[in-house]
Image (tube, rainbow, N blue to C red):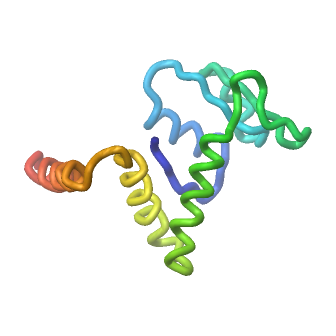
Amino acid sequence: MKIVVVNNATKEAIDGILESCVVGSPVVNTDDFTSYGHLKENYVHHVVNHSRKEYANGDAHTNTIEGLCSLLRHYLNTFRGVCKKNLQKFVSFFEFRHNLRDLSPMDILHQLLVGIIVPATKS
């Protein structure tokens, strides 16, 4: 799971994020936000139309990401406000913990140390 803070959710911003994060030709499920309308050109794109009170369309739904956003809001609320400058850092830490949630604390520590040491030695 990759979570990116976006100042303006334009078509160009969404394309840039997807191009940097997505491999292959995945299925993309979204709500009916207009900036997602063009995704059908490059992806298998299923839309759930929330404005018509539709919350699932066959196997297509946005419940997973909405649940994750709820957890993220709860996590951020513990800090009683985060400035925009540091928001991506807090979100990235939440993403890190979420992606490793099934690992033991020692395995998480190992992943953290590998992430710190390996990039520093590649220079």
Q: Is residue 66 above or below residue 31?
A: below
Residue 90: name its quadrant.
bottom left
Q: Is residue 5 above or below residue 83?
A: above
Give x and y (percent) for residue 36. 70, 36
Residue occupying image coordinates x 37% and y 52%: 96
- Image side of residue 120 versus residue 5, left or right: left
Residue occupying image coordinates x 52% and y 35%: 18
Residue 21: name its quadrant.
top left
Residue occupying image coordinates x 65% and y 50%: 9
Most foreground residue, 27 or 70:
70
Most foreground residue, 24 or 101:
101
Most foreground residue, 121 or 109:
109
* Identity of the residue furthest to the left in this view: 121
- Image side of residue 96 versus residue 51, left or right: left
- Image side of residue 99 versus residue 17, left or right: left
Most foreground residue, 60 or 35:
60
Give x and y (percent) for residue 24. 46, 20
Give x and y (percent) for residue 67. 62, 49
Residue occupying image coordinates x 60% and y 22%: 43
* Identity of the residue furthest to the bottom in this view: 80
- Image side of residue 28 versus residue 24, left or right: right
How many marks are shown on the rendered structure?
A: 0
Give x and y (percent) for residue 102. 35, 44
